[in-house]
Structure formats: structure tokens, C-alpha cells
Image (cartoon, grey):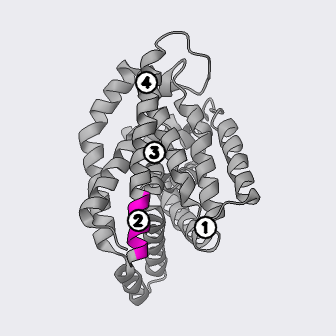
């Protein structure tokens, strides 16, 4: 049953709000609110259209573009854009002034998202449980790694960084900026953009475009052929990403995890509130979806 444009816009706004936060992915919101598969299908159609265009197959390009549900992607994009424009400054200010408390809130929101996403796996078995745990453990340890940076990398390194980092855009639980931090390319890419190094930015953008085209096709196929196993892995990614949001000692500024020393009560209360709000909202949405499917 297609989602109404107003509902999709609201989901887009939530996705854009999540994308502002370091370590949080808009893909998490898409998964929890039930639009993840349609998002991947839409990105895959855009990728297929681009592939036809590169082969100068205008008829094929037009056919793929006609398959896209524009009443889904346009409100979604508008919601994301509005969130980025209206909330970025406020959230950045709160992250600077209240890093521990904000991290507590985000930790609870993502933990609630993990709980809310579990019913998205239609049939659990031991293999899918193992996939969830293995991906979660791998993500936890990988997200503890931050490269100290790369000195004067070649252009192909920017291409590769873009191709890898863009994959995080459509994965829940991890952000593209954090992938660049892990690769040691974050400051270099940001500097290239700020200094208007057009050739470098073009190479990076090309890597992003090709990476998105290829990865979206793979994920599209995997979701349609191995849905429950893939979703279990995505939930594992979200679970492992909680390392980035552990409030103590630095909030979302680092991945070192220590026991809380001070400012404990408020972050915990915010975490519990975030968990309850997300889990409760997702449970209601999930039941509404299932009721609609039974009626249809």
C-alpha cells in the first residue's frame, strides 16, 4: 500500500534530522518507519536510468524514469532538505554545548530503533540471529578505528573514498562522514570542498555516483532475494553503531567508551525517553501497516 505524500514528507524530515547527527544514519529512520525497501528500489531505478544514459540508450533511460514513484521520492527529498536547512545549526549548537546529554538522547533513539526494527524480519531462525550478532560485533570494532589521516593522497584515493562512503547513505546505523574519518580522508575531502578544488571534488563525486549505482543494485537484489537475512544484518549494523553514540566521556566526538563519572542522570533519562518514543512509535506504525495489508 503506497504511503501518502504527507507521511513520506514527515519520514523524510526525520531522515534529514538523523543525517545531521554524527554516527546516525537516515537509513535507520527509513528502516524503522517502513520505507527502506521502497527507498532502495527507487535509488536502484535511478542507478539503472543512469546506466542506460551512459550507454546513450535514451529509450531505456525514459522507461526507468517512468517506473519511479515520484510522489514518493519528491516529498521524501523535500522533507530531508527542510530538516537539513532548519535543524542543522540548532543540533550542531547542542552537540557543542551539551555533547554528553545529546549523545544520551541519540543513544536511546538508535537503541529504540534496533528494538523497533526486529519485527521487520518476518521469520527469525538461528542463521539470521548469528548474522545479526556477527555484523553487530564487526561494526562495533570497526567503528572504534579512526585513521590519523592520509598525507597527499593520489586522485584515485578520493574516487575510492567516495565510492565507499556513499554506501553509508543507504545503510542504517552508520554515516558517510564517519566512513571518511575511518579512511583518514574526512579532512582532505572537506578541505577540497572548502578550497574549491574542482578536479578533486569531481573525482570524489564520480566515485560517489558509481559506488551508489553499483551498491544500490546489489542491495536491491539482496533485499528481494534474501530479505530477512539482509534486514538482520542491517539491524546488526545499527546495534554496532551504538559505540559511536556512547555518551561518556566525549559524547559523539569520539569512540572511546568509559563508565560515567558525572552528568549521569539526565543522559540516562534522555536515553530512556528516546528509546520509549521510537519503540512506541514504530510499534504503532508496524501494527497499522499490518492491518492495512490484511484489508488489502
Q: Secondary structure at mark 2?
A: helix
Most foreground residue, 87 or 132:
132
Residue position marked by numbered label 3 in the rendering: 279
Determine which quarter of the picture holds residue 194: top left
Q: Which mark is residue 269?
A: 4
Q: Main secondary structure of the magenta part?
A: helix
Estimate how packed mark 1 is, as few (under 14), some (14 to 19) or many (20 or more) residues with alpha carbons within 10 Å.
Answer: some
Residue 218 percent across, percent down from the top left? 60, 68
Image: 47 above or below 153: below
Name the residue: 59% across, 59% down.
231
Q: Between disc 1 and disc 2, whose residue precedes?
A: 1
Taking the image as shown, residue 138 lies to the left or right of residue 33, namely: right
Q: How far separated are the C-alphas under marks 3 and 4? A: 15 Å
Image: 147 above or below 171: above
Q: How far separated are the C-alphas under marks 1 and 2? A: 18 Å
Q: Between disc 2 and disc 4, whose residue precedes?
A: 4
Name the residue: 35% across, 43% down.
17
Residue 235 visible in the picture: yes
Q: Between disc 2 and disc 3, whose residue precedes?
A: 3
Residue 191 percent across, percent down from the top left? 44, 36
Residue 191 visible in the picture: no
Amino acid at each position: 500500500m503506497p504511503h501518502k505524500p504527507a507521511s513520506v514528507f514527515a519520514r523524510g524530515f526525520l531522515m534529514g534530522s538523523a543525517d545531521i547527527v554524527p554516527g546516525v544514519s537516515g537509513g535507520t529512520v527509513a528502516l524503522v518507519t517502513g520505507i527502506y525497501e521502497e527507498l532502495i528500489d527507487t535509488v536502484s531505478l535511478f542507478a539503472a536510468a543512469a546506466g542506460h544514459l551512459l550507454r546513450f540508450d535514451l529509450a531505456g533511460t525514459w522507461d526507468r524514469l517512468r517506473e519511479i514513484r515520484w510522489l514518493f521520492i519528491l516529498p521524501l527529498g523535500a522533507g530531508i532538505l527542510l530538516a537539513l536547512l532548519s535543524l542543522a545549526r540548532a543540533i550542531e549548537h547542542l552537540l557543542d554545548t551539551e555533547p554528553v546529554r545529546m549523545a544520551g538522547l541519540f543513544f536511546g533513539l538508535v537503541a529504540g530503533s534496533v528494538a523497533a526494527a526486529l519485527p521487520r524480519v518476518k521469520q527469525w531462525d538461528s542463521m539470521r540471529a548469528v548474522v545479526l550478532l556477527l555484523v553487530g560485533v564487526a561494526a562495533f570494532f570497526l567503528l572504534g578505528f579512526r585513521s590519523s589521516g592520509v598525507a597527499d593522497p593520489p586522485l584515485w584515493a578520493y574516487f575510492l573514498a567516495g565510492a565507499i562512503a556513499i554506501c553509508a547513505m543507504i545503510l542504517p546505523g552508520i554515516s558517510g562522514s564517519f566512513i571518511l574519518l575511518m579512511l583518514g580522508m574526512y579532512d582532505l575531502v572537506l578541505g577540497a570542498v572548502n578550497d574549491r578544488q574542482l578536479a578533486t571534488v569531481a573525482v570524489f563525486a564520480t566515485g560517489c555516483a558509481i559506488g551508489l549505482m553499483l551498491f544500490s543494485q546489489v542491495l536491491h537484489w539482496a533485499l528481494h532475494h534474501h530479505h530477512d537475512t539482509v534486514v538482520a544484518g542491517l539491524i546488526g549494523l545499527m546495534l554496532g553503531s551504538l559505540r559511536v553514540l556512547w555518551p561518556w566521556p566525549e559524547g559523539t566526538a569520539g569512540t572511546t567508551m568509559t563508565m560515567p563519572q558525572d552528568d549521569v542522570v539526565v543522559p540516562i533519562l534522555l536515553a530512556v525517553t528516546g528509546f520509549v518514543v521510537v519503540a512506541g512509535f514504530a510499534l504503532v506504525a508496524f501494527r497499522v501497516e499490518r492491518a492495512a495489508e490484511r484489508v488489502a
